[in-house]
Amino acid sequence: MKSPRLASAVPIGKLPCWCWGAVLLLGLLFASCASKEPPQSSIYVPPVKGSPVVYLHPEDPGNYRRATVGVLPFRVPVNHDPARGEALAALFRDVLLAKEVFPRVIASRQAYGDFDDAIALGRQAGVDLVLAGRLHRALDATELGGARAEISIRLINVHSGNTVWHIAQAMDQPVDHHDVGPWTRIKESFTLPPIRPSRGAPPLPNMLAAMAVDMAEVMQGAHQVAR
């Protein structure tokens, strides 16, 4: 089956208003371990969003327009709080509902072992599809940038056990390395170092929300999503 690559979605900072509650929850959770580090006061390097990669998709997405979906907690790396997986599940539930991708979407707090367990949980919940996601990487930024996020999702038909959608996406925030060349050092010896401006909250929660929006549009049948 063909695996089209899709264009980038809505720019960060222009997310729909209905996303911000879930983004705030993600921000609180992903900032918990960063609270032991120096505050991020100068994050200003814009992230670079990779296109969603669709590995599997149905020939006619319209056949699933009236399907009900159960979103399971995302699997997260071992050094992450499992509550972050629940927060990601809640984010995808909110995005799928707000964009009216499916008529009924519920989020579960029950962890699963493998896809067979995920299918069993979906059957218990009485849904048609179960969304099993994985957070592969989530790195927050320093004042010079360097955030990274990578997630993948599978929507599995609980009746047949087949994967309907399999989508992955990654985003990076480049690192703005300070120029330490000889001319720069001479110049800075006679002037005060520049003060990097504050650019608001850490970018990681917004990056995850932007990818959720992209993937929701893919599941609506889009071959390209808006930049």
Image (cartoon, rainbow, N blue to C red):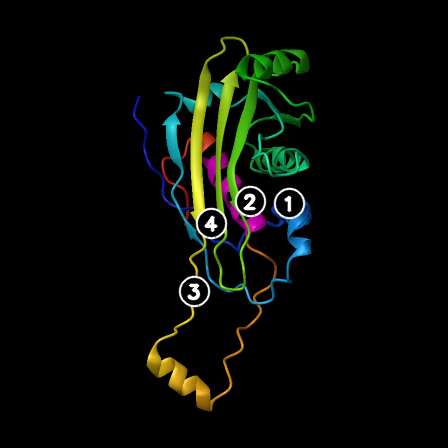
The disc, 2 or 3, on the residue closer to the chain's N-terminal end is 3
The residue under label 2 is 209
Residue 206 belongs to the span the image colors magenta: yes
What's the amino acid at mark 2? Ala
Query: Of the residues under marks 4 and 3, which one precedes in the sequence?
Result: 4
Please state the extent of the stretch shown in magenta in the rendering.
204-217
**Residue holding disc 4:** 10
| Residues at marks 4 and 3, CA–CA distance in whole angstroms | 23 Å
User: At x 43% / y 64%, what residue is drawn?
Assistant: 176
Dot 4, how many residues are within 10 Å of its Cα: few (below 14), some (14-19), or many (20+)?
Answer: some
Q: Of tags 4 and 1, which is closer to the observer?
A: 1
Give me the disc on residue 176: 3
Whole-Å distance between the Cαs marked 1 and 3?
Answer: 25 Å
**In which image quadrant can residue 57 be found?**
top left
Q: Secondary structure at mark 4?
A: loop
Nearer-the-camera pick, 214 or 143? 143
> Which numbered disc, 4 or 3, marks the residue closer to the eye?
3
* Residue under the image location 58 percent in, 38 percent down: 95
Q: CA distance from mark 4 to mark 1?
A: 19 Å
User: Can residue 210 be seen here?
Assistant: yes
Q: Is residue 77 above or below residue 144?
A: above
| Dot 1 or dot 3, earlier in sequence | 1
Q: Earlier in the sequence, mark 4 or mark 2?
A: 4
Q: Main secondary structure of the magenta part?
A: helix
Q: Decide: marks 1, 2 in contact (CB < 8 A)? A: yes
Nearer to us of marks 2 and 3 is 3
> Can you tell which of label 1 and label 3 is closer to the viewer?
3
Q: Are marks 4 and 1 in contact (CB under 8 Å)?
A: no
**The disc labelled 1 sits on which kind of residue?**
Leu
**Residue type indicated by callout 3:** Asp
| Residue matched to label 1 | 26
